[in-house]
Structures are given as structure tokens and as C-alpha cells.
Amino acid sequence: MGRQIALLRAINLGPRRRVAMGDLRELLASLGYADVRTLLQSGNVVLTSTRSGKPLERELEEQLSTRFGIDIPVLVRTRAELAAVIERNPLADLAADPKRYQVTFLSAKPDAPRVRELVGLDVAPEQFVISGREIYAWHPDGLQRSRLAAALSDGKLGVTGTSRNWNTITKLLALADD
């Protein structure tokens, strides 16, 4: 059994799509997942499971839909995959504020034409690096009016994605190791 990190997309951002983290932990424990822990209110879960990857994503999505009545995309990374995301950190020398440094976790690698379109955007002074199923993005002026954040969140990549800031990512790894 391994430690898995489940990232729920677009929950608790407003009055709709609300999921209480206590209810989420209770549901996952009742399904047989061990050591279920949540971080913040934005759908960050660490759990122990014999499943990982797509099978775990599908099972969690089905159970969340049944229990909470809303479709919630779920992206899963193993503890080792999350550690590798942190280790790669291609913008470490540039990203000075971890609240403005995000990683967008993707359900799959985006196809080449969509990557070219994203690379062709003029988003300076923002910078990003696409690395497999993750996009590292530095937003020096914040996220409020970020053209890059908008491009990463509006479906232009053709795959499901959810973003977390660097503080959250490192805390998730620490939680997985706890």
C-alpha cells in the first residue's frame, strides 16, 4: 500500500460545489482508504491505498459524485511523483514568493499543437515550464489579472488540470511523509 495524493478540482471556491473536509475524510475512510488526511479546504487529500493513478482517480470521482451529488475531477500523484515534482523545480532561481509560484497538475501530457499555442502566448513577465504532466508557473504580479493563469485554467490544454501553489505542494509532501 502506498501514499497517494488526490487533488480535487474546483471545490469550495464559492457557495456552490461545497465539500466539507470532515465529510470527505469520513467518506474515504469508509471506503477502506487508510491514513486519510486533508490539507486546507481546497480538496487536497493524502491517503494510503493499493490503487493509484487512473483507477484511483475513477473510483474517487464516482464515489464523490454519489456521495456529494457533484462531478469533481480528481488528479492523483503518488508520493514519489509529488517528490519528483518538487525536486525538478525548474523555476527555483526565479520564483521568490511561493504563493505566486504554482504547479498545474494535468490528467495527461497536452498534445503538441496545444503546447505550441501556449508557448506562443505573450505572458511576460510571467514564466512557465511544461514538464510532463505538470506546468510550473511563476506569476510575479500575482494571479488576479494573470494572463497565464487564465490560459492554464480555461481548457485550452485539452486535458483536465488543477493548480496548487508551492506552499501547498510542499505541505502535501510533508503530510504524505508524516
Image (cartoon, rainbow, N blue to C red):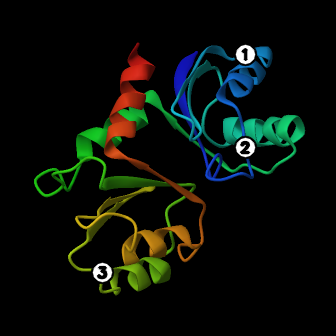
Q: Quick check: marks 1 and 2 in contact, CB under 8 Å?
A: no
Please tell me in which quadrant of the rendered image residue 42 appears. top right
The amino acid sitting under disc 3 is Val
> Pointer 2: residues within 10 angstroms few (<14), some, or many (20+)?
some
Residue bearing mark 3 = 123
Q: Which residue is most to the left?
A: 93
Residue 136 placement (x, y as % from top left): 33, 58
**Residue at screen point 71% across, 51% down:** 15
Residue 148 located left or right of residue 68 = left
Q: Quick check: marks 1 and 3 in contact, CB under 8 Å?
A: no
Between circles 1 and 2, the one closer to the viewer is 2
The amino acid sitting under disc 2 is Arg
**Residue at screen point 63% across, 20% down:** 49
**Residue at screen point 44% across, 28% down:** 79
Label 1 and label 3: CA atoms lie apart by 43 Å
Residue bearing mark 1 = 29
The amino acid sitting under disc 1 is Ala
- Say whether disc 1 or disc 3 marks the residue closer to the N-terminus: 1
Residue 98 located left or right of residue 146 = left
